Image (cartoon, rainbow, N blue to C red):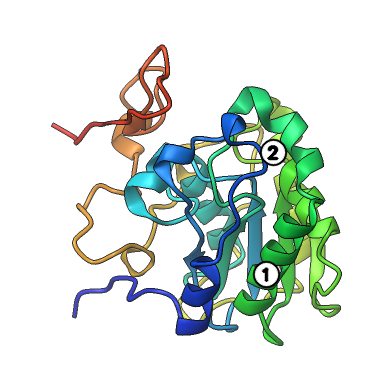
């Protein structure tokens, strides 16, 4: 039987329909619209990953953390033995212009944003939650502003998967895996006994996005950019933006 994401719960979908507008539309790719989640939003997740905001591949897929960064995150989850018991959310539902990101961190605390975002976190998680992984400064601020974070869930703060400091990134993720392996129960088909991160990101540290996390009909290569990463170029993803970026255009390339 084909696996695919059958969509969120009614409660989560109703909440997403009430997403507030960005606080400053000039700081966001508003024309692409919001992206909300990937993974389980029914309260069964044992790990919540919070990242910053959706990117170009996320807009194509309609799901969070599916591009190059998301495939790094999937590798992180695989090292914990998780194949399905996770949920990936963001600090912002709209994509943020990188040059405006530091200023937008301060806007996370605005009441309309905080109330909605915290309700999203509350609705997507439940008593099964064992850990929260906040990836990057934007996510860490969003989690700090979440007063109802389940007390039983261990919080770890790590660099964002797109960090330009590879040493800090790998040191942080390596330490997080060490901390979380005794805490997070693996899925039945998962394995948390494999190698931790080494001195550099290897292709084996990535994982394709599971088909169960993607909408029905998504092409087979969506969520697996290994063919791009191993192609020898600077691009790491099959979805890119033009240069100069007009804020409206995405370029999506299929493998040959």
Is residue 60 at least partly visible in the picture? yes
- Cβ atoms at labels 1 and 2 below 8 Å apart: no
Q: Secondary structure at mark 1?
A: helix
Q: Nearer the viewer, residue 167 or 6?
A: 6
Q: Identify the residue under disc 2.
A: 170
Q: Nearer the viewer, residue 202 or 128?
A: 128
* 180 lies left or right of 246: right
What residue is drawn where x is 73% and y is 54%?
134
In which quadrant of the rendered image does the C terminus lie? top left
Q: Secondary structure at mark 2?
A: helix
What residue is drawn where x is 80% and y is 78%?
150
Q: Nearer the viewer, residue 256 or 102?
A: 102
Query: In the figure, 116 relative to 204: above or below?
Result: below
Residue most extreme to the bottom: 127
Query: In the figure, 167 relative to 148: above or below?
Result: above
| Residue 58 percent location from the top left of the image | 42, 47
Q: How many marks?
A: 2
| Residue 184 percent location from the top left of the image | 69, 74
Nearer to us: label 1 or label 2: 1
What residue is drawn where x is 61% and y is 45%?
22
Q: Identify the residue under disc 1.
A: 121
Please tell me in which quadrant of the rendered image residue 165 appears.
top right
How crowded pointer 2 is (Cα within 10 Å; few <14, some 14-19, many 20+) is rated as: many
| Residue 192 percent location from the top left of the image | 60, 67
* 183 lies left or right of 82: right
Residue most extreme to the left: 256
**Could you give the CA–CA distance between mark 1 and mark 2, rounded to whole angstroms?**
27 Å
Please tell me in which quadrant of the rendered image residue 100 appears.
top right
* 168 lies left or right of 99: right
| Residue 108 percent location from the top left of the image | 76, 48
């Amino acid at each position: 039987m084909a696996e695919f994401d059958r969509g969120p719960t009614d409660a989560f979908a109703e909440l997403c329909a009430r997403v507030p507008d960005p606080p400053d539309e000039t700081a966001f790719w508003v024309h692409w619209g919001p992206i909300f989640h990937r993974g389980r939003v029914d309260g069964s997740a044992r790990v919540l990953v919070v990242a910053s905001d959706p990117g170009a591949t996320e807009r194509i897929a309609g799901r969070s953390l599916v591009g190059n960064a998301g495939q790094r995150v999937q590798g992180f989850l695989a090292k914990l033995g998780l194949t399905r018991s996770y949920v990936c959310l963001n600090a912002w539902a709209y994509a943020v212009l990188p040059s405006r990101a530091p200023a937008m961190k301060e806007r996370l605390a605005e009441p309309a944003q905080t109330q909605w975002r915290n309700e999203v976190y509350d609705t997507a998680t439940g008593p099964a939650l064992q850990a929260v992984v906040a990836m990057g400064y934007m996510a860490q601020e969003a989690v700090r502003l979440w007063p109802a974070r389940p007390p039983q869930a261990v919080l770890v703060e790590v660099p964002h998967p797109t960090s330009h400091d590879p040493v800090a990134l790998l040191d942080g993720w390596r330490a997080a895996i060490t901390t979380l392996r005794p805490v997070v129960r693996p899925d039945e088909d998962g394995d948390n006994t494999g190698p931790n991160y080494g001195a550099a990101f290897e292709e084996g540290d990535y994982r394709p996005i599971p088909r169960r996390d993607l909408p029905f009909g998504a092409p087979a290569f969506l969520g697996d950019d290994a063919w791009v990463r191993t192609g020898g170029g600077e691009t790491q993803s099959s979805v890119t933006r033009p240069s100069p970026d007009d804020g409206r255009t995405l370029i999506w390339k299929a493998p040959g």
